[in-house]
């Protein structure tokens, strides 16, 4: 019914406009053109004011907590096997373990490309930067979709990820993101280079991505590592990772079952992952904007499902 009303309105406007143009052309003179131009000017201004009154910038914000378990002796994520707790939790820590040891092969030897954290500040930054890279990878996998099979002892669990459908998407080649991820030290490995060179990353058409590091300051607060998606005139969507503290040695997230001797030098670093999305005023009523709002919610939901403690 709404479409029928709109269609009828469009037809009526077109007919009125056509008749008006014909009459103006048949009677074109200063006497006719002066009031017509005046009415057009006032009508245009009124229309602009009405549209501007409707358009309003909108924002979204939501958070969840995730963590990194750091082996303080190895100076790297702790090795946690699939039989030591909840499968989803142990799979996440297994991913962090692999990402946390970037290596390149030189003369037949695997060389770790990053230094161990030696101070508390370095440990926080290390874990935070690792999470930034892991969150970015998780978003990329959500966007591509696919399947995964995890076997725990005699049990197996398969999952399927279906990307959200957007009207205007461009499937960017993975190599386009090599300069972007280069700012994160955990991308400096042969395996990651191959991953990006031979992968792909579907995103909204004309969207850009950046990995941002914000040092702590009185004006901006604690240190942050941010993944930012932007589309001019439409949105800026940030996923910010911020520290919440650190535990003493041997304290682990709930759901892990590791013997005390193994965890004697392990510490847990909790972080807050926050979605902060701003949708531009100028396209507030555009049909794509509603899609992008749903897309931001879908990404956040997927991240929380995969990464939340």
Image (cartoon, rainbow, N blue to C red):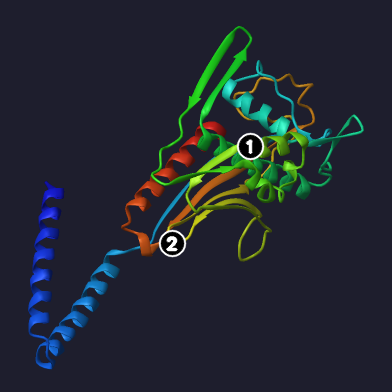
Q: Residue at x 79, y 21 (%)?
A: 261
- Spot the residue most to the right: 107
Q: Residue 217: x, y in percent?
A: 66, 63
Of the pair 78 and 132, the residue shown nearer to us? 132
Toward which corner of the image does residue 77 lie, by quadrant? top right
Q: Residue 301: x, y in percent?
A: 46, 37
Disc nearer the start of the sequence (2/1): 1
Q: Tell me the element at label 1.
A: strand
The reply to whether residue 309 is visible in this rendering is: no
Q: Tell me the element at label 2.
A: loop
Question: How many marks overall?
Answer: 2
> In the rendered view, does 264 fall on the left or right side of 135?
right
Are there few (<14), some (14-19), or many (20+) residues within 10 Å of tag 1? many
- Spot the residue most to the front: 26
The reply to whether residue 161 is visible in this rendering is: yes
Q: Which residue is mark 1?
A: 67
What mark, if any, has residue 253 been given in the picture?
Answer: none
Q: Residue 165: x, y in percent?
A: 40, 38
Q: Residue at x 64, y 23 (%)?
A: 256
Q: Which residue is mark 2?
A: 233
Task: Please determine whether, in this image, residue 122 is positioned above or below residue 92.
Answer: below
Are there few (<14), some (14-19), or many (20+) residues within 10 Å of tag 2? few
Toward which corner of the image does residue 297 lie, by quadrant? top left
> In the rendered view, does 194 fall on the left or right side of 87?
right
Q: Residue at x 60, y 42 (%)?
A: 173
**Marks 2/1: CA–CA distance:** 35 Å
């Amino acid at each position: 019914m709404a479409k029928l009303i709109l269609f009828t309105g469009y037809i009526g406007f077109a007919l009125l406009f056509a008749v008006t143009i014909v009459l103006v052309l048949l009677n074109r003179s200063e006497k006719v053109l002066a009031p017509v131009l005046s009415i057009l000017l006032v009508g245009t201004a009124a229309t602009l004011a009405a549209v501007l009154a409707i358009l309003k910038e909108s924002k979204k914000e939501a958070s969840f907590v995730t963590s990194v378990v750091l082996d303080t002796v190895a100076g790297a994520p702790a090795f946690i096997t699939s039989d030591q707790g909840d499968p989803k939790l142990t799979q996440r820590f297994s991913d962090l373990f692999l990402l946390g040891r970037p290596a390149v092969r030189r003369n037949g030897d695997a060389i770790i490309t990053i230094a161990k954290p030696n101070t508390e500040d370095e440990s926080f930054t290390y874990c935070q930067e690792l999470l930034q890279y892991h969150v970015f990878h998780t978003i990329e996998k959500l966007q591509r979709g696919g399947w995964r099979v995890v076997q725990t002892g005699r049990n197996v669990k398969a999952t399927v990820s279906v990307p959200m459908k957007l009207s205007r998407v461009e499937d960017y080649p993975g190599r386009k993101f090599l300069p972007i991820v280069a700012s994160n030290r955990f991308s400096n490995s042969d395996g990651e280079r191959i991953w990006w060179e031979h992968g792909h990353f579907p995103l909204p058409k004309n969207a850009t991505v950046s990995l941002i590091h914000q040092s702590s300051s009185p004006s901006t607060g604690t240190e942050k590592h941010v993944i930012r998606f932007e589309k001019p005139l439409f949105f800026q969507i940030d996923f910010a990772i911020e520290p919440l503290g650190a535990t003493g040695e041997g304290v682990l997230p709930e759901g892990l079952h590791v013997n005390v001797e193994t965890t004697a030098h392990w510490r847990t670093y909790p972080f807050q992952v926050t979605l902060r999305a701003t949708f531009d005023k100028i396209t507030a009523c555009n049909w794509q904007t509603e899609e992008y709002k749903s897309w931001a919610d879908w990404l956040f939901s997927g991240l929380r499902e995969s990464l939340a403690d």
